[in-house]
Amino acid sequence: MERNSSVEINSEIELRLLIEAIYLKYSYDFRDYSSASIKRRVNHALSQFECNTISTLQEKVLHDPTAFMQLLQLLTIPVSEMFRDPSHFLAIRKEVVPLLRTYPSIKVWIAGCSTGEEVYSMAILLREEGLLDRTIIYATDINPRSLEKARQGIFSMENVRAYTANYQQAGGQRSFADYYTAAYGYAIFDKALRENVTFADHSLATDSVFSETQLISCRNVLIYFNKKLQDRAFGLFHESLCHRGFLVLGSKETPDFSAFGDQFEPLVKQERIYRKS
């Protein structure tokens, strides 16, 4: 029993040292990410790197930037899909779009955009509603490989079958195949969808606001943060949003218990769509 306890304590210390080392060497700040989430991903990384201890992994990534980039993929890539939770996008179409129409120009910030599935979903929705031409979308993430994949707009056809069903349930107005060209098992999405998209490196843990926006989408990102970092993110969102701007979150996320709980009011609470108070 004591031996197990000692191993756990050592592991906790090693994990904290690894996260601190990553911050000091590469300026990626995971110090206020959920410890359970980071621990799970680091344990997975140990098997991928064939390391017996976190200390061994730390030595490897400190001395080899390529190894660090491989670790970064394991620490940051969440599961994503286009039009994920179709009822959420249907609610945006019905409840948010009519209000967005009242703005002469629109800025949308998709924070933690990963490999771009939500970026293309939002672009398609805005195009169908006649708003894409007067919209700038900022798509940000801390992972440069994810951003590059998002820029390319190429997704496996295996996944596109599921995306098609999501799109239809989300109130899609056309054939989903109109938006991509199929080739060699991949779907290459229409480059016109990203003409108004700016892909940029941005960390909710360390960076500041860069523009006033009408809508911010940050879905299934805050669940990986501890309360301190969640509060920081909500502060950034509040500062970035225009008067009565919209904040959309993932199905398990809410500003209710944050330091900014009284700064957002629900528009469609079930779908986690809020407005700046």
Image: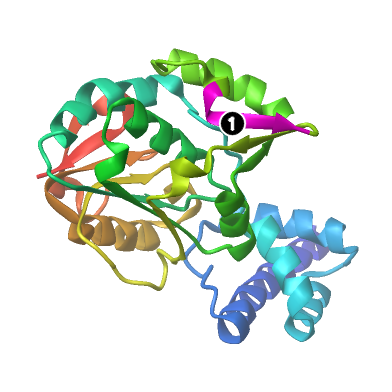
The image shows residue 224 at horizontal and vertical percentages of 50, 52
- Specify the quadrant of the image occupied by residue 129: top left
**Quarter of the image where one finds residue 72:** bottom right
**Image position of 58 (left or right of 170):** right
- Residue toward you, 39 or 179: 179
Height in image: 19 above or below 98?
Answer: below
User: Which quadrant of the figure contains the C terminus?
Assistant: top left
Pointer 1 residue: 180
Residue pictured at 45% horizontal, 41% vertical = 193
Q: Say which residue appears at 71% left-offset and 28% top-offset.
A: 157
Residue 251 seen by the camera: no
In terms of secondary structure, where does tag 1 sit? strand
Q: Locate the N terminus and report the quarter of the image it occupies.
A: bottom right
Comparing 26 with 20, the one in front is 26
Percent x, y of residue 175: 51, 16
Q: Nearer the viewer, residue 36 or 190?
A: 190
The answer to whether residue 126 is seen in the rendering is yes
Q: Quadrant of residue 183?
A: top right
Above or below 262: residue 28:
below
Please report the bounds of the magenta region as a residue range: 178-183
x, y (%) of residue 192? 46, 42
Q: Residue at x 72, y 65 (%)?
A: 71
Q: Dot 1: within a 10 Å radius of its alpha carbon, few (fewer than 14), some, or many (20 or more) residues?
A: some
The answer to whether residue 153 is left or right of residue 140 is right
What is the image's colouring?
rainbow
Give the vertical position of 162 relative to 156 (above or below).
above
Left or right, 60 with reference to 99: right
Overall secondary structure of the magenta stretch? strand
> In the image, is residue 90 part of the stretch drawn in magenta?
no
How far across and how far down the image is residue 252, in percent? 42, 35
Indicate the amino acid at tag 1: Tyr
Q: Horizontal placement of 122 versus 242: left or right?
A: right
